[in-house]
Image: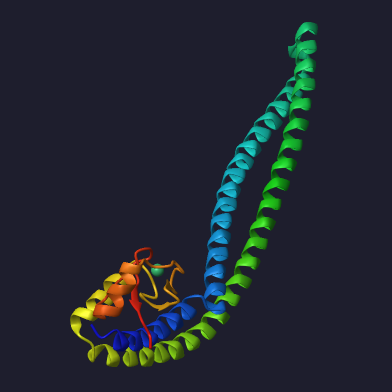
Amino acid sequence: MDLSKLWNYMQSDMEADRFSNEMKSSANRRLLLKNAEILKEQQVRFAKVDEEITAMLERLDSQKAETERVSQLFAKTMEEIGDVSKLDENEIEDKMKLVERLSATFDQCQRELTRLAKDADNAVQTQNQIKRLAAKTKAEYDRVKKEYDTEFALGKQKLKKLRDAADQLASGLDPADLERYRQIKQHVTPPIAKLENNQCTGCFMTLSVGTIRGIKASGMGVTCDNCGRLLFLSE
Ligand SMILES: [Zn+2]
């Protein structure tokens, strides 16, 4: 196992990984994701208020119908009272009481209508406000997206160069060594650590005499007992 070649390859591989992570955590990318999230929240809020408005308008319609019904009944009763010749005293008294009740109910209906109309108006204003905010968020999203797209295109080119350089080094490796490297990398990264002062520089554990002897003797891929990294004894 040629650990020195593998070590060189790792430097190149890690550089490409680092750059790839940098791209993923770029400020513009995070801002873009944040704006997308805010936009989604605003859309959900907008839809919710929209539902509320629909319900309010339905209540407003039925309240209008009820007010109209009371109003007509009031007019009819007043008409009946107007024609006193057809009524006796008791009937007149009953009708007067009914008129009083209808009048009170009508006032109540009017107040309810005013309240409902005001609520619906407020909801529409809230909705407009959300719409304005969403438009602002969308504009910000589009602005960042444009910047990010440029940044991403350049980044992709650079990443490809770094990957190509790493692949170039990989082609000079023993395929079995590369496979071992990749398997270790799935569990721990970077997958190779130097051995210094009898310690693994990946996890800083002091290694057993047996392990150290193994590394010095064979130069075969000996791994750290603690973190599983391949240990590299540099000259
Ligand atoms: Zn270790």
Residue 185 visible, this angle: no
Q: Quadrant of the N terminus?
A: bottom left
- Residue appearing at x 35%, y 89% in the figure: 8
* 223 vs 68: above or below: below
* 61 vs 97: above or below: below
Q: Nearer the viewer, residue 92 or 66?
A: 66
Residue 218 visible, this angle: yes
The coloring applied to the image is: rainbow
Give the side of residue 43 with respect to residue 82, left or right: left
- Residue appearing at x 23%, y 80% in the figure: 177
Q: Quadrant of the C terminus?
A: bottom left
Residue 194 point in image, percent of width and height? 40, 79
Q: Nearer the viewer, residue 21 or 210?
A: 210
Residue 64 point in image, percent of width and height? 65, 39
* 217 vs 165: above or below: above
- Residue appearing at x 34%, y 73% in the figure: 212
Tell which quarter ligand 1 is in: bottom left
Residue 188 point in image, percent of width and height? 37, 69
Residue 124 point in image, percent of width and height? 66, 55
Give the side of residue 57 with respect to residue 93, left or right: left
The quadrant holding residue 233 is bottom left
Q: Nearer the viewer, residue 148 or 206?
A: 206
Q: Nearer the viewer, residue 161 or 63?
A: 161
- Residue appearing at x 43%, y 67% in the figure: 206
* 60 vs 148: above or below: above
The quadrant holding residue 223 is bottom left
Give the side of residue 69 with respect to residue 10, left or right: right
